[in-house]
C-alpha cells in the first residue's frame, strides 16, 4: 500500500501535532503517524505543562479548550534528608488569572486533544502505526515505511517528532543511533489517586489552583531529583535519575522511589492515596550540546527528538519547546511547498526560526547547566547541609547560641567543605 | 504506598504483543561486566541469574522507555524497536 501526502509527521505528541496542525491549517495534506492506539497512549512526563505561546494565536483561550488538570500558582523547591526537609515556596495571585503560567496535565488526554485539533484542521491521523524506516531517493528523504504491513507513506517533507530516541532521525542519518548515558535521564512516576478537597487542604490550594514541587536530596546520592505535582484529583509523584549515575550506583529506580515515598514528610502528603498508574520515560538532558543535525533534504527534527529540553533543577521544560519547534517545522514546510523546494538549503529556515526564538536561545544560555548538574555534591550533601543548618537555627535547648556566621561556617565545613562550597556557588552562578 | 513490580499489570495496562520488540544476544550478556540493564530498567524486565550465568529478558511489562537501549554498553540487542502499532504499554491517566 502506498499513500502520498504533502507532509508526513512521525509522532503525535506535542511537537508532531503542533506541526501537523500548522500545516493542515495552511491547506497541506498531512499524515500524522502515531504508534499508539491513540495519541498520548505512549506518552508520559512529570506533569507540568508550561505556557505554550506558540499555540496562543490558534487557541486564544487555550485554558478553556484544552483538557487541563490545574493551573500552577505555587512553586516549591525542597531540600530533603531521611528525616527532615527544608522547603522554599513561591505562591502568587499573579498566576491565578489567565493566561496562566503553567498547568498540570494528563498526557493521554492532552495529547489526544491536540492531535484531534490537528485532525479538525484537516490532518490525517494514522494510529497503530510504528514507523520502520525512512524511504530515501537520490539521497533525499521522501517518505517512511510502517512496521505493520510494510505500507509506504510518501511526501516531500518528513518531520521527525518521534521522541527522545528518534529512530526516524537516526535512520535518516541526522544523528548517531547511540546515546551517551550521561546525557539521558530516566523519569519514573506514580500517579496517586486522592480526593480533590484533600489535595487542596494538604497543599494549601483552592478550586483548581495547583502546586508543583521539585525535591533534591532524596535519591541516595544518585544524580537526579523528585517531583510532586497536583492534578485535579490525583498526585503525580516521581523521580528523574541520570542514567550514568544510576548505573554506577547499582540502585534501582523503583527502590529509590519507594524509599522517597516512605520519607516521613512525603508519606504525610501521600497518606490515604492509592496507586493508579506507574510509568517511565527517558528525558534528553544533555542540553545544547546534544542537539542533532536539525534538517536535511526532505526532513526536519522537532521536540524531544531534537533534544529540546531544559533542565535547570528549578524549571523543567520541554513541551513548550516541542510545541514551538513543531510550529516552526510546520511553517518551514509550508514555505518549502510555496517555493517547491524541499532541499536542505530551503529547510535551513527552520533552524533560523529556532535560533531567533526562545528554543535555541534558552538552550544556548543554559548550555553549561547540564555539566554543572553533574556535581554529585548537589544530590548527596547539600540537602544534609541545609537541613542540619536549619535544625541548629531553630533548636533552643539551653546551650548558649553561636553567631549565625559561625553556625553556617561550622555546618559548611562539616557537611561540604568550604572550598567545595565556594567552587559550587561559583559554578552554579556561571551555569544559571 | 509502595510500588511492587510483581503487580505492575494491576496498575499499568498493556496490550502484549506475542512478537517481542526487543531481542537479546544472551551470549554477549554473559561476558558483560556491568549489566546496567538489570538495575536501571524501571520495569525490572532484565534479571541475571548468577548460578546459571543466564540473562532473562521478559518484554511483557516493558514501559518502552529506552533505558536499556541507552545503558547497554555492549550493544547486546539483535533487535530494539518499538512494538508494532497498537501493542505494548497503554497509559490511560498519566
Image: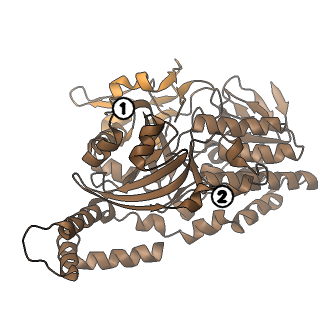
Chain colours: A brown, B orange
What number is the disc on residue B46? 1
Q: Is residue A359 left or right of residue A421?
A: right
Residue A431 in the image: x percent, y percent? 47, 73
Q: Which of A218 and A155 is in front in this view?
A: A218
Q: What element carries label 1?
A: strand
Q: How far apart are marks 1 and 2 (CA)?
A: 33 Å
Residue A266 in the image: x percent, y percent? 31, 46
Q: Which residue is drawn at 43% across and 56% down?
A: A182
Say which quarter of the image contains residue B90: top right
Identify the image quadrant of the N terminus of chain A.
top right
Q: Residue at x 55, y 60 (%)?
A: A93
Residue holding disc 2: A293
Q: Is residue A164 left or right of residue A428?
A: right
Residue A205 in the image: x percent, y percent? 47, 49
Say which quarter of the image contains residue B7: top left
Chain on which label 1 sits? B
Q: Circle 1: is it few (<14), some (14-19), or many (20+) Cα within 10 Å?
A: many
Q: Residue at x 39, y 38 (%)?
A: B41
What number is the disc on residue A118? none
Chain on which label 2 sits? A
In the image, are marks 1 and 2 on the same chain? no
Count how many numbered circles sit on residues in the image. Answer: 2
Q: Nearer the viewer, residue A215 or A171?
A: A215
Say which quarter of the image contains residue A195: top left
Q: Which residue is drawn at 46% across and 77% down?
A: A430
Residue A241 in the image: x percent, y percent? 39, 50
Q: Is residue A348 left or right of residue A34?
A: right
Q: In this view, does A319 lie to the left or right of A85?
A: right
Q: Tell me: residue A317, above or below residue A270.
A: below
Q: Tell me: residue A421, above or below residue A99.
A: below
Amino acid at each position: 500500500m502506498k499513500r502520498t501526502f504533502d507532509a508526513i509527521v512521525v509522532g503525535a505528541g506535542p511537537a508532531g501535532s503542533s506541526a501537523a496542525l500548522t500545516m493542515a491549517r495552511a491547506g497541506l495534506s498531512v499524515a500524522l503517524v502515531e504508534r499508539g492506539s491513540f495519541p498520548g497512549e505512549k506518552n508520559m512526563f512529570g506533569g507540568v505543562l508550561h505556557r505554550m505561546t506558540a499555540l496562543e494565536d490558534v487557541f486564544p483561550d487555550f485554558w478553556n479548550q484544552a483538557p487541563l488538570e490545574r493551573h500552577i500558582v505555587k512553586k516549591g523547591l525542597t531540600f530533603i534528608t531521611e528525616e527532615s526537609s527544608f522547603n522554599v515556596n513561591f505562591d502568587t495571585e499573579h498566576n491565578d488569572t489567565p493566561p496562566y503560567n503553567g498547568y498540570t496535565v494528563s498526557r493521554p488526554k492532552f495529547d489526544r486533544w491536540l492531535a484531534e485539533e490537528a485532525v479538525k484542521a484537516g490532518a490525517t491521523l494514522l494510529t497503530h502505526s510504528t514507523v520502520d524506516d525512512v524511504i530515501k531517493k537520490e539521497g533525499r528523504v521522501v517518505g517512511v515505511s510502517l512496521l505493520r504491513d510494510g505500507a509506504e507513506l510518501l511526501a516531500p517533507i518528513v518531520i521527525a517528532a518521534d521522541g527522545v530516541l528518534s529512530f526516524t532521525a537516526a535512520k535518516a542519518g541526522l544523528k548517531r543511533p547511540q546515546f551517551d548515558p550521561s546525557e539521558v535521564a530516566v523519569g519514573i512516576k506514580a500517579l496517586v489517586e486522592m480526593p480533590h478537597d484533600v489535595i487542596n487542604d494538604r497543599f494549601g490550594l483552592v478550586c483548581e489552583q495547583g502546586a508543583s514541587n521539585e525535591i533534591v536530596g532524596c535519591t541516595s546520592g544518585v544524580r537526579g531529583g523528585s517531583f510532586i505535582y497536583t492534578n485535579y484529583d490525583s498526585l503525580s509523584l516521581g523521580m528523574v535519575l541520570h542514567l550514568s549515575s544510576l548505573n554506577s550506583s547499582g540502585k534501582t529506580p523503583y527502590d529509590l522511589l519507594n524509599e522517597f515515598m516512605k520519607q516521613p514528610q512525603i508519606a504525610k502528603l501521600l497518606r490515604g492515596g492509592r496507586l493508579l498508574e506507574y510509568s517511565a520515560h527517558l528525558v534528553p538532558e544533555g542540553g545544547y550540546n546534544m542537539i542533532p543535525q536539525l534538517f536535511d533534504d526532505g526532513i526536519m527534527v522537532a521536540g524531544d527528538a531534537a533534544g529540546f529540553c531544559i533542565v535547570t533543577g528549578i524549571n523543567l521544560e520541554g513541551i513548550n519547546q516541542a510545541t514551538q519547534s513543531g510550529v516552526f517545522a510546520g511553517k518551514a514546510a509550508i514555505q518549502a511547498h510555496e517555493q517547491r523546494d524541499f532541499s536542505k538549503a530551503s529547510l535551513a529556515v527552520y533552524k533560523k526560526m529556532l535560533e531567533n526564538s526562545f528554543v535555541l536561545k534558552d538552550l544556548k544560555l543554559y548550555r553549561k547547566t547540564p555539566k554543572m548538574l553533574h556535581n554529585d555534591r548537589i544530590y548527596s550533601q547539600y540537602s544534609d547541609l541545609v537541613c542540619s543548618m536549619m535544625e541548629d537555627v531553630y533548636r533552643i535547648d539551653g546551650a548558649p547560641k553561636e553567631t549565625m556566621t559561625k553556625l553556617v561556617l561550622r555546618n559548611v565545613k562539616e557537611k561540604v567543605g568550604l572550598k567545595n562550597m565556594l567552587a559550587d556557588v561559583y559554578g552554579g552562578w556561571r551555569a544559571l | 504506598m509502595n510500588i511492587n513490580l510483581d503487580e505492575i499489570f494491576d496498575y499499568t495496562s498493556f496490550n502484549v504483543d506475542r512478537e517481542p520488540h526487543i531481542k537479546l544476544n544472551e551470549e554477549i550478556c554473559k561476558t558483560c561486566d556491568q549489566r546496567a540493564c538489570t538495575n536501571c530498567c524501571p520495569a525490572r524486565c532484565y534479571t541475571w541469574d548468577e548460578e546459571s550465568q543466564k540473562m532473562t529478558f521478559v518484554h511483557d511489562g516493558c514501559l518502552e522507555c529506552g533505558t536499556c537501549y541507552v545503558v547497554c554498553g555492549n550493544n547486546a540487542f539483535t533487535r530494539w524497536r518499538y512494538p508494532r502499532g497498537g501493542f505494548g504499554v497503554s497509559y490511560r491517566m498519566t
